Image (cartoon, rainbow, N blue to C red):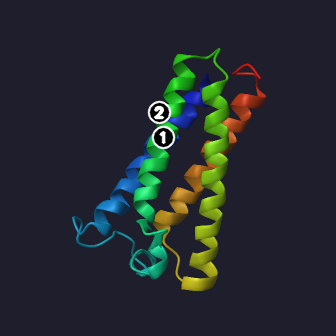
Amino acid sequence: MRAWMATALLSLAGLLLALYLYLYKLGLIGQLACGTGGCETVQLSPYSRFLGIEVPLIGVLGYATLLILSILSLQAPRDPRWPRLLLWLSAAGLMFTGYLTYLELFVIRALCRWCVGSAVTILLIFVAAWLGRRGGEALP
């Protein structure tokens, strides 16, 4: 049960982080609190869209989905569907984040602190989901 609580709290944190970046993309926040200028460079680059969708919006939708799955895992601890789906979607999010981090480091050549925070968050969600499934918190 602790793993699902951890994934829920981390998903909520990721959701708020992605929402902050999406509000910036919508022009509702004047300047990102970053300090280095790398955040705006990344957010305004052509790579800030994936298949025509703003990357922060993908983050909002992804973290919201993970939050819902975490809550479902808490509510139905004997139902293996939700933890399994949580694990797979967090793995997909981790791979997508790896791709975005590669773009930041080697293509855009700027690093966004908020994006790094999101990368750490999705990594922790994946680890918690994996430990929860491995620890027998859900039936196989």
Q: Along the line of sight, which residue is nearer the eye, 47 or 132?
A: 47
Q: Is 5 on the left or on the right of 18, as rendered?
A: right
Give the labeled residue for mark 2: 68
- Classify mark 2: residues with Cα within 10 Å, few (<14), some (14-19) or many (20+): some
The circle drawn on residue 77 is none
Give yes or no for contact between labels 1 and 2 (Cβ–Cβ under 8 Å): yes
> Which residue of the protein is positioned furthest toward the front in this rendering?
51
- Disc 1 element: helix
Residue under the image location 61 percent in, 44 percent down: 89
In the figure, 16 relative to 49: above or below?
above
Q: Position of residue 17 (x, y in %)?
A: 41, 54
Residue under the image location 40 percent in, 58 percent down: 57
- Classify mark 1: residues with Cα within 10 Å, few (<14), some (14-19) or many (20+): some
In the figure, 84 relative to 140: above or below?
below
Q: Is 130 on the left or on the right of 120, as rendered?
A: right
Q: Which quarter of the figure is the C terminus placed in?
A: top right
Q: Is 84 on the left or on the right of 8, as rendered?
A: right
Q: Position of residue 35 (x, y in %)?
A: 39, 76
Q: Position of residue 84 (x, y in %)?
A: 67, 32
The circle drawn on residue 65 is 1
Residue under the image location 73 percent in, 34 percent down: 131
- Disc 2 element: helix
Q: Is 31 on the left or on the right of 121, as rendered?
A: left
Residue under the image location 21 percent in, 64 percent down: 28
Q: In the rendered structure, which amino acid carries the disc numbered 2? A: Ile
> Residue 22's image quarter?
bottom left
Q: In the rendered structure, which amino acid carries the disc numbered 1? A: Thr
Q: CA distance from mark 1 to mark 2?
A: 5 Å
> Residue 41's image quarter?
bottom left
In the figure, 126 relative to 46: above or below?
above
